[in-house]
Image: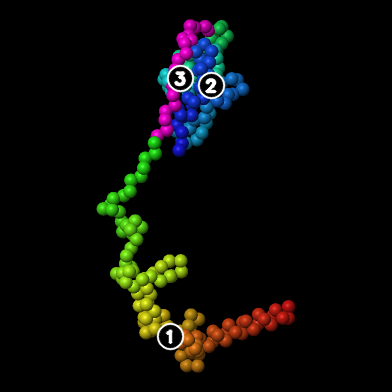
Amino acid sequence: MTQTEAQRFWPRIKQGDNGCWEWTGQCRANGYGSFAVRVSDGRWTTTTAHRWSYAEQVAPIPPGYEVDHLCKNRACVRPDHLEAVTLQENRRRRDRGHVVELDCSQATIPVAPAPPVPQQRKRPSRSFIGPRLRRQLAPATACKNGHEYAVFGKVKNGKNETCAECRRIQYAAKRKGTGHGTETHCPKGHPYSGDNLYLRPNGGRECRTCVYARNRAAYNRRKAAREG
């Protein structure tokens, strides 16, 4: 579950001297805290911890403004120790020394909000589900042709199972010539008739021209292997 910015930010704060809230996370070389945030287009970027605290606790920071530490503690993120000022004012305060009276009492640091409790997905009502999902929720008792599995049973069909009665009807149709086995020509176009028709002992049919071609090709392969 993705944490919000507040859930990541506030656990990294501790009480410091003069009532400061000091950042304990990663800091930059200049002493300011560094905090990762996600911008509107989904990319991650880094900002300073005190700027995030001011924008979250006080008000949005106007464009071109900086957040000045009134307590002169760069690790502090306490909102009433911060003030948004222009770049020129921030430089003037740095050069001349700007001292203000601050509240140095130990203020309560905000508690990170608890993560949301994941909601349980409700099982869809049977009155609003389609036939496919209904078959998954309740195993079918009959095939698509209406044959009851309890009466006719099931047979293996590769990795799946199919209706035994449908399989029996399918095989019966083949034996009667209403299915496979009624072709008049082989896949190569040679007729299943006359001297070109070869009947196998099991009743199957084969094209003599194709059989001869397969045998001849196998002989040529064996001959080439011996000579090579």
Q: Label 2 sits on what residue type? A: Trp
Left or right of 15, for residue 220: right
Mark before the other along the chain sequence, 1 or 3: 3
Mark before the other along the chain sequence, 1 or 2: 2
Instruction: Say which mark, if any, is on residue 184.
Output: 1
Image spot of residue 82 (x, y percent) = 48, 15
Label count reads: 3
Instruction: Say which mark, if any, is on residue 1.
Output: none
Image spot of residue 99 (x, y percent) = 52, 6
Give yes or no for residue 99 being in the magenta stretch. yes
x 44%, y 24%: residue:
111
Q: Which residues are magenta?
A: 98-116
Residue at numbered disc 3: 109
x 31%, y 69%: residue:
148
Q: Is residue 184 above or below residue 107?
A: below
x 73%, y 78%: residue:
228
Q: Is residue 145 above or below residue 71?
A: below
Tell me whether circle 1 and circle 3 mark residues in contact (CB < 8 Å): no
Residue at numbered disc 2: 23
Q: CA distance from mark 1 to mark 2?
A: 87 Å
x 42%, y 83%: residue:
181
Image spot of residue 28 (x, y percent) = 59, 24
Mark before the other along the chain sequence, 2 or 3: 2
Using the rendered view, name the quadrant where residue 180 is placed.
bottom left
Give yes or no for residue 215 being in the magenta stretch. no
Q: Point out the residue furthest to the bottom here.
A: 195
